Image (tube, coloured by chain):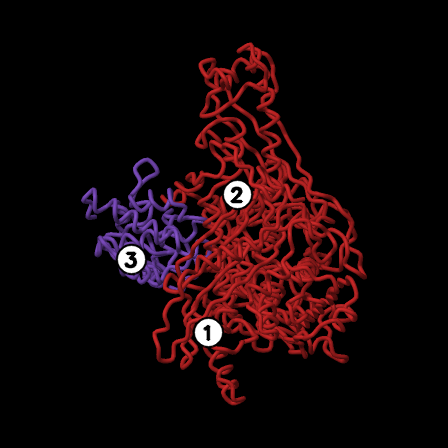
Amino acid sequence: MSDVDTIQPNLRFSQIGKSLTRTDSPGKATGRTPYAGDYVMPGMLHAKVLRADLASARLKRLDVSKARAMPGVACVLTAQDMPDRAIATDIPGQTGRARLKTDQQILVKERVRYFGEPLALIAAETADIAEKARRLIEVELEPIPGVYDPEEALKPGAPVVQGTDNVVATHKIRKGDTEAGFAAADVVVENTYITPFQEHAFLEPEVGLAWIDENEVITIRVCTQVIEHFRAVADAIGVPHNKLRIMGALVGGGFGGKEDVTVETYLAILAQKTRRPVRLEFSREDSFVGHGNRHAMKLKYRTGVTRDGKITALDVQVIADAGAYVYLSPYVLLYCAVNAPGPYRVDNLNVFARAVATNNMFTSAFRGFGGIQAAAAYEQQMDEVANAIGMDPLEFRRQNFLQTGDPISTGFVPPSAIWTEKCVELAWQALGEPTPAPGGSIRIGRGIAAFQQSYGRLTFLHDTSEAWVGIEMDGTVTVRSGVTDIGAGQASSLAQIAAEVLGVTLPNVNVYNSDSQVTPLAGTTTASRALYMTGNAARLAAQAVRDRLAEVAAELFKAEPAQIDMEFNRVFVIDDPERSMPIAELVRVCASRGVHRSELAIFRAPFTDVLDPETGQGQAHPDYAYGAHAIEVAVDTETGEVTVLKSVAAHDVGQCINRAAVEGQIHGGVQNGLGYALSEEMLYKEGRLITPSFSEYLMPTAMDMPPVESIILESRSGLGPFGSKGIGEPSMTPVAPAVANAIADAIGVRVFEMPITPERIWRALQEARARGCR
Amino acid sequence: MSTEKTITLRVNGHDEIATVPPHRTLLEALRGLGHVDVKCGCEKGDCGACAVLVDGEAVDSCLTLARSVEGREITTLQGLGTPEAPHPLQQSFSELGAAQCGYCTPGMIIASESLLRKNPSPTDEDVRIALSGNLCRCTGYVKIFEAVHAAAAVKRQTGETK
């Protein structure tokens, strides 16, 4: 596999890899871009959701009569109006496998399982009337004992959230002989790391507009990462799949929080009942309880190591808080298990991971998807083990890095380059000279973290993606693909790929996307897969069109097709560029000859079976991305305040499609990771969220962000178009542990629970002083 | 309703009529008039997505009552420029990739413009402080800071003061 470690230096692109202005940028910067919440229709109703204000309760009484009687109220719905309905919350897949028992009641029938669970839907002539009607609904909830800690939930006699017990999913990975590995160790280091819930905090709350069209199709314009929930929504409301259409819009941020169904089912039901257009917009408080958050996890790491720095065994026990409904918990947990050892060779491995139901908010997808919790633990543990054997943390990592061609935890050998070591060295060097300590109570510290993060969905889901590319008589290009654009430039990247292949300039490409019944289905914008999957589909389609055009051009120029090139809207003979014509002219010739000027292509990820249930061996993902993050912090030991001074990201992205967009992903990932490490905390009291706004839930502001340096490497070894990998999730994965390691380096003690707030730092220092440390 | 009152709002240089109850926020009123470039992110003044200029000063329209700004000059993002003739901030946000999902962008550009009108040569710290009331979840603010400085330079060169 060593050949993939060589950059192909002689490739020349006219569009790919450049920091071109994204096709969606001018509209956004001038306020012309309509978002899902900006669409209105004549006769449109406004909807509201009434939610439970207890996390575990029995619904004793729900009286909507006064609300229904209020003038201007079109409809008030409760579970009584939909007794047989539920919405599937499982991953949309193509395998046809029997799903886990993952259906959720649409509205509470009898049992409330989490704070904020919807009780009733209201639709009225104005939002004001809907709000007044909501307040007229009389609710009586009888509290019943709930369970709010996954470890408590595992104990015998604990309240059961749903079904027969609280274990939602279990994953095991077993490799080699851990007993022998620990016996061979000179030192065994055991620590438990706690990672918190996290809120996506996209700026655009969930919103949509539903109506019934002239063909009796329930049509929903909504901000979502997954238009292919149209099937689940159709099933939930009892209409055929081809009578439910979901149209996206440019999405105001997703990060996994718009991966599950949010407003769609409510909108579909209300439109079905009222036969009028209905708009539903979540308030920020609705949003906090309206989509699943990141799983809080407890990860116990036990590492055996020799004095000279070789890991001999690793045992990992994980408990994840799945909250009240299953959603994507089994898959998030699987990512955590697969990535448990990180980008290191561990021949003797035992991972036992469980997701456990509680009456907390349900948890689901969030950028990093379980891989991030694993990284938070394995990279802190690498530093702790290095300390225990008195070895430099970088040197210890060097002894154990996976190299290109090595198998990961599941025995699978990633097909692409593994450039972790290169990234670690470059990121660390780029920190430069240490910032001098200003004295007093301020301490300076540095930390590094490497990572492994998949791109592309689980291979047992048999993921596919389609794209259609056509070229018009004037030489402009149309791309049609269902891909949703959640702000990373997904549509613009497709345009750039089509432009590169067909030799036209970017403004000459238009992408029609995100329509479940009109654009070819492209799958989800999740799992860092959009570029990999849909990018490949677009490239295949564009290539097929190009090949047909080139054949005609070759005939016109009396040359071989291989001698034909297309660039900057012209077609020419490579060795004789004087023999050329505008591409538009060539297309017109093709049209007159009936040449097929479009192509619908499908791209298939590798298809595999599920991992072995006992050993976890097999292939879980198409491939993995690797990189590193380095951080320098200043910590005030009197107040516990942390200031991030330097932040350096180094990633092998395979190949940039749009360099500025890649940098943008890295910057956003850093911000997301800094918040995760330092300040973002969802506080629950008996399941009740007590931080449901941005004045309580603290994400990094403009004042908190350090300068970010991005080192972007291009191995051109990835499975995406032109050798690209994914960067959406990888950009965030190593940030939090790098911060944690920098803080530990600064103050000499480790805070084992994130977010590492001033209070936790102060307490850890007090405890260390009490123990007689420094 | 008897408490409703018809007011005139001057938006992007045009007078517009709205009939609003006393509690109607400027955010709701503007969106009701079709100015959907003003974004709703929290309705609590936490996120800044709804910022507009009132007499040149950035305010959160969700914390401003519509009736309180009658007769004053209100500018939304669309009022600063068009795709054909963009404002320097619109140009730099677009070209430098400072808009990702774009939902915070209207508020960001408005807050930046409010800063540049008062301070044509802001330092990094000035920019950070001016944008500290505007949350972004996509960009880490990095390219936003770059875009503000780039637009400031353009404005200084062209002598544009407004």
* Residue B16 x, y percent position in the rendering: 29, 47
Which residue is depicted at the point 45% across and 50% down?
A664
Task: Give the quadrant of residue B1.
Answer: bottom left
Indicate the chain on which mark 2 is placed.
Answer: A
Locate residue A722 relative to residue A765 in the image: left or right.
right
Q: Is residue A391 above or below residue A562?
A: below
- Viewer-nearest of labels 2 and 1? 1
Residue B58: image tag: 3
Q: The red chain is which one?
A: A
Mark 3: give few (<14), some (14-19) or many (20+) Cα within 10 Å.
many
Give the secondary structure at mark 3. Answer: strand
Point out residue B79 in the picture as x, y percentages from the top left corner: 29, 45
Q: Mark 1 lies on which chain?
A: A
What is the secondary structure assignment of the residue under circle 2?
A: helix
User: Which chain is painted in purple?
Assistant: B
To which residue does mark 2 refer? A490
Q: In which quarter of the image is the N terminus of chain A?
A: top right
Direction from residue B89 to residue A623 in the image, left or right: right
- Asked whether the residues under marks 3 and 1 belong to the same chain, the reply is no
Instruction: Name above or below for residue A269 compared with residue A111.
Output: above
- The residue tagged 1 is A746
